[in-house]
Image (tube, rainbow, N blue to C red):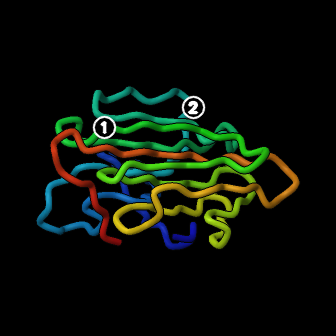
Amino acid sequence: MRADAHRPAADEDGVPVCEVASSPDTPGRPERWRWHIRLREESPDGRAEVPSRQVVHLGLGPDTSLEVAVDPASVRAEVELVDLTDTYLVGRDERGLVVLVQGSGRCLVEGRHELGRHDTLVLEGDDPMSVGLVPTGTGPTTVAVVRLHPVEDNVLGWVP
């Protein structure tokens, strides 16, 4: 998804955020909430952490962070901020999914998807089990790699 296609939303305190992916993805769907990934402006005084929330700074300056929130009873998250200097291989397991959120710079995923700032790519289901990330610009290139794993014996899916 291109950055301009992300959905404006508000957090539980009414603070504006930008939702890049979630499950369920569409508000009002009958499925129970399991996870979301949002871009948010950093507040100068910081934010209190909630046990089910993991917040990772994308390295875009002091004003933007990536928020990964999960229902810990059903989803476990691993978040990694990668400074791309060469080809980087990202793998996923067959039951989970991987979400790539471009920070700074640009990169090419799987040799065909170019991501720019805040563009997001979700890999799940029939998508490849591993993909290569290659920086395409001359400046610093960062990518957030979010791996979501089911806690129960099921498969995580995502419907855009």
Q: Secondary structure at mark 2?
A: loop
In the displayed structure, does residue 153 sit left or right of residue 100? left
C-alpha gap between disc 1 and disc 2: 29 Å
In the picture as drawn, the residue positioned furthest to the left comes out as: 30
Q: Point out the frontmost of discs 1 and 2.
A: 1
Q: Amino acid at mark 1?
A: Arg
Residue name at image x 23 percent, y 35 percent? 72
Q: Is residue 153 above or below residue 109?
A: above
Residue name at image x 17 percent, y 68 percent? 29
In the picture as drawn, the residue positioned furthest to the right comes out as: 138
Expressed as whole percent of the image width and height from the top left, the position of residue 14 reads 34, 49
Residue name at image x 52 percent, y 55 percent? 130
Q: Name the disc covering residue 44, or none.
A: 2
Circle 2 crowding by C-alpha within 10 Å: few under 14, some 14–19, many from 20: few
Residue name at image x 44 percent, y 51 percent? 38
Q: Are marks 1 and 2 in contact (CB under 8 Å)?
A: no
Q: Name the disc covering residue 76, or none.
A: 1
Q: Amino acid at mark 2?
A: Pro
